[in-house]
Image (spheres, helix red, strand yellow):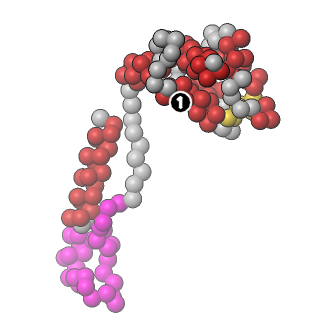
Amino acid sequence: YKGIFRRLIVEHILFQLVKKGITLRALFHLMDKRSFGYVTVEVFRQVLLTQGIKDDEVTALMDFVDIPGGKIRYRDLFDLSRRAADDECDPLGNESMRSIMPQFDQRRTIVSVVCITRHGARFPLKTFPTVTHWPVRPEFWERYGGKLTPTGVIQHEELGRTLAWRYV
């Protein structure tokens, strides 16, 4: 029954947070102000209590999280929540995170995406005296020097389609 209890307590706490519009990542960021990747047990308990989670529920959750040296790592919490969300069915008939999370995901909106890429294939900026396979006329270099090649244009169009498919 330990696995069922773990899943129920994790689902219950995550459901309480989701109802408030709080993700596990946002909660951990709230706790881990200096981005260490872990928080102390005291900070973890205090933040969950301020979010309306009952003390005995926090204690039960902490029984399932590995706490080496009094520190709770984000990865441990994430793995624990992932295991609860991935469980196919609940033998007790409770609503699972799998059915709750799609409703939450539909409310989230991406405001912006920052994509850092290297340029696609492009012509060199200038001619090189020892390279004979590039044109030597100055008109070519004025018009095409440093600009994308036809292959580079295709690469950027494919990148744009991929980003649009993923984020729009």
Where is residue 1? Give x, y as percent. 63, 18
Task: Decide if residue 110 is on the left or right side of residue 152.
Answer: right
**Residue situated in front as seen by the camera: 52 or 7:** 7
Residue located at (33% from left, 39% from top): 166
From this viewpoint, is residue 19 visible? no
Where is residue 20? Give x, y as percent. 51, 13
The answer to if 63 sits in the magenta stretch is: no
Amino acid beneath label 1:
Arg
Identify whether 145 is placed above or below 162. below
Identify whether 50 is placed above or below 124. above
**Which quarter of the image is occupied by the C terminus?**
top left
Residue 28, picture quadrant: top right
Task: Decide if residue 113 is on the left or right side of residue 72.
Answer: left
Where is residue 63? Give x, y as percent. 72, 23
Residue located at (79% from left, 31% from top): 70
Residue located at (74% from left, 32% from top): 67
The answer to if 130 sits in the magenta stretch is: yes
**Residue situated in front as seen by the camera: 84 or 42:** 84
Residue located at (23% from left, 70% from top): 144
Where is residue 111? Give x, y as percent. 39, 31
**Residue situated in front as seen by the camera: 141 or 52:** 52
Classify mark 1: helix, strand or loop.
helix
Residue 68, picture quadrant: top right
Task: Decide if residue 167 is on the left or right side of residue 4.
Answer: left
Which region is colored magenta?
Answer: 119-147
Residue tagged by mark 1?
82
